[in-house]
Amino acid sequence: MVEGETRVRLELPTGLRQFAGGKGSYEVRAATLADAIARLNEEFPGFAYRVLDDQVKMRRYVLVFVNEDPVAHLRPEDVRLKGGDTVHILPSVAGG
Amino acid sequence: MADAKKGETVVTVGTRKGLFVFHSKDRRRWKKRGPYFEGVEIRHAILDPMEGKALYAGVTSEHWGPMVSRSTNLGDRWDLGKEGPRFTKESGLTVTRIWQLQQGVDGSLYAGTEPAGLFRSEDHGVTWSSVDALNYREGRDKWPPGGGGLCLHTILPYPKDVKRMLVGISAAGIFTTNNGGSSWRMYDAGIREYGKQKFFDKEDTSTCVHKMVRDPTDPAILYQQNHAGVFRRSRGDPEWSVAEKGLPVAKSTGGPFGFSMVAHPHDRGTAYVVPLVGDYNRVTPKGAMAVFRTTNGGKRWERLSKGLPQKDAWFNVLRDGMRADDGDPAGLYVGTTTGQLYASRNDGNSWELIADHLPQVQSVEAGTVGGR
């Protein structure tokens, strides 16, 4: 176990599950949002590409909440996680 | 390849909402497959022209990133891929759309992207490498976007020389390499200044190329539908020259306006365009659809409309909305922004509707199962 890592839950929307083994919920050990994405990418290569842009920021139309706090505007490595946190990844809904 | 047999014609239709695939033994009766990638925009899809075995689709998911997916059974199953083309972190750029797919002379796969970038894959689209000399070319920060964004939408390998290639970027202009992409120069001299009868005299001028094709019998001859007119250029010519006689002229641009252009697969000097009213009204003139053909290298264009709607046809044909197959006589296919797919199996002399009520057509490509 890496120092600072803690057990968190990731909740994935329907459209993203096809790139993550088909399930909507995973528990991973992570210290930051970047770690959590990296853990899932280890299990499902290509997952990180689906949510991170070429600048390794969250994609423009991807929303992320840690519990109830929006964090998609932050760099994933700057989003600290603590034990029991739930990370919700959602597609933003827009258009007509 | 599923129920399609070797020698069948395949037409891939990329739309705002998924990919449709049509195939036919005789180009009279068509079978439809799809839509694939339900609800997702497909800017471009191709049947690999060399072997005619694999479909490639440029999949633009606004949420989950742009990808190139591959199918070896005409769409029954798609390899969704792991990663699409990417710019470097240092560039400050992020690929958002796949605009164009093109097979290279050596069998590699090229992708043109938005923001404008050229990427190459040597493993059927699984991994990609950036063509850095173009993608990070000095001055790219000044490349102006077109109405559809800053996109690399045309990739023209040179059939006889793997080191030669041209690309079109809206609205940065045309770039050419003769050393395998190690360096690029611009190729825009002779294009009309917007709304004038004056022409740029410098190659390194940003012009809004809409589509560019090679002459089928001499790939050193190019034809171009530009925002500001229709032009022709042969290697060695000092500049592009106007090739518009017989085409309707837009009031705004000073020349014929349109997006799509395709070359005949066999006949020298033969190419097709679909003129629109102008950049201020991107629909077919007078609500009457027509494809225009030149058979003499752009010296004269003739209007072809038999079988095409001549009343209340108010739509656009986008830059990749028209393609030819390699049949003899040639089959031509035109997809509209209102969801019609028209086909001709006699060089464009007459047309028939083979699909209606599709989502907005972004691109049409034609190929042959088993290759040419």
Image (cartoon, coloured by chain):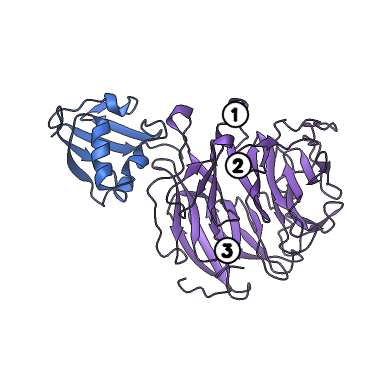
Q: B175 above or below B12?
A: above
Q: CA distance from mark 2 to mark 3?
A: 22 Å
- Chain of the residue displaying label 2: B
Counting residues from the N terminus, which is met first, the one under dot 2 or under dot 1?
1
Whether tag 2 and tag 3 are in contact, CB under 8 A, the answer is no
Q: B241 above or below B310?
A: above
- Chain of the residue displaying label 1: B
- Chain of the residue displaying label 3: B
Q: CA distance from mark 2 to mark 1?
A: 16 Å
Crowding near pointer 1: few (<14 within 10 Å), some, many (20+)?
A: few
Circle 3 sits on which residue? B50
Amino acid residing under circle 2: Gly
Circle 2 sits on which residue? B181
Amino acid residing under circle 3: Met
The residue under the point 86% across, 48% down is B245
Q: CA distance from mark 1 to mark 3?
A: 33 Å
Give residue B140's mark: 1
Chain represented in purple:
B
Image position, residue B288 (x, y; %) = 74, 53
Q: Quadrant of residue B305?
A: bottom right
Counting residues from the N terminus, which is met first, the one under dot 2 or under dot 3?
3
Q: Does residue B265 show up?
A: yes
Secondary-structure class at tag 1: helix
Give residue B69's mark: none
Secondary-structure class at tag 2: loop
Q: Quadrant of residue A77?
A: top left
